[in-house]
């Protein structure tokens, strides 16, 4: 019986690792909090959002975001603060800026170049005479 109790305590350990936060009084604030925490990368884990991470830094970021929302800051202001403090890497979807224009538009430009090249090749090949003597 004692081993069953210890086993159940062991299985419940991950529950205590999650940051228990109360739901905000305003549903709009709560929705904004959840949206932001799903879009911010955990700087320790790097492949998890801070909403899913149990790292201490992620918990600190969640508390900081909650505090900023309670102070009335907008989503854009919070994201700007995070980017200024931790860099563009902190956001899963980086902000659109002049210097990263190539990253945003590069794939589209390369696709258009490929389509133009393909159409030129097809046009030139259709104008070539058919050689019926070739094996």
Image (cartoon, rainbow, N blue to C red):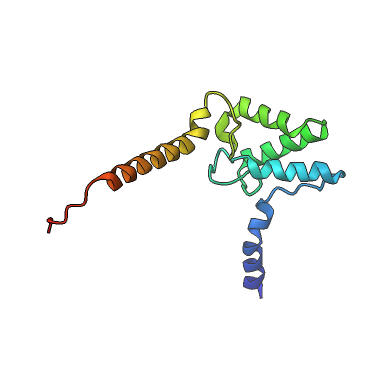
- Asked if residue 59 is positioned above or below residue 15 in the image, the reply reads above
Residue that sits furthest to the bottom in the current view: 1
The quarter of the rendered structure image containing the N terminus is bottom right
Q: Residue at x 67, y 28 (%)?
A: 80
Residue 7, located in which quarter of the rendered image? bottom right
Q: Residue at x 66, y 45 (%)?
A: 38
- Asked if residue 66 is positioned above or below residue 54 in the image, the reply reads above
Residue 95, located in which quarter of the rendered image? top right
Asked whether 55 or 102 is in front, the reply is 102
Q: Position of residue 10 (x, y in %)?
A: 62, 62
Q: Is 124 placed left or right of 82 in the picture?
A: left
Asked whether 66 or 34 is in front, the reply is 34
Q: How many marks?
A: 0
Residue that sits furthest to the right in the current view: 25
Q: Position of residue 92 (x, y in %)?
A: 58, 40
Q: Residue at x 65, y 51 (%)?
A: 17
Q: Position of residue 124 (x, y in %)?
A: 29, 42
Q: Residue at x 79, y 45 (%)?
A: 30
The quarter of the rendered structure image containing the C terminus is bottom left
Asked whether 98 or 17 is in front, the reply is 98
């Amino acid at each position: 019986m004692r081993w069953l109790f210890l086993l159940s305590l062991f299985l419940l350990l991950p529950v205590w690792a999650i940051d228990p936060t109360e739901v905000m009084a305003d549903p709009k604030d709560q929705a904004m909090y959840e949206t932001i925490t799903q879009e911010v990368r955990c700087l320790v884990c790097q492949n998890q959002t801070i909403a899913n991470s149990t790292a201490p830094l992620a918990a600190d970021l969640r508390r900081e975001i909650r505090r900023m929302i309670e102070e009335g800051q907008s989503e854009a202001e919070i994201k700007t603060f995070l980017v200024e403090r931790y860099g563009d890497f902190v956001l899963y979807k980086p902000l659109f800026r002049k210097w990263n224009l190539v990253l945003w538009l590069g794939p589209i430009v390369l696709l258009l170049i490929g389509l133009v090249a393909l159409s030129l090749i097809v046009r030139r090949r259709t104008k070539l005479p058919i050689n019926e003597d070739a094996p």
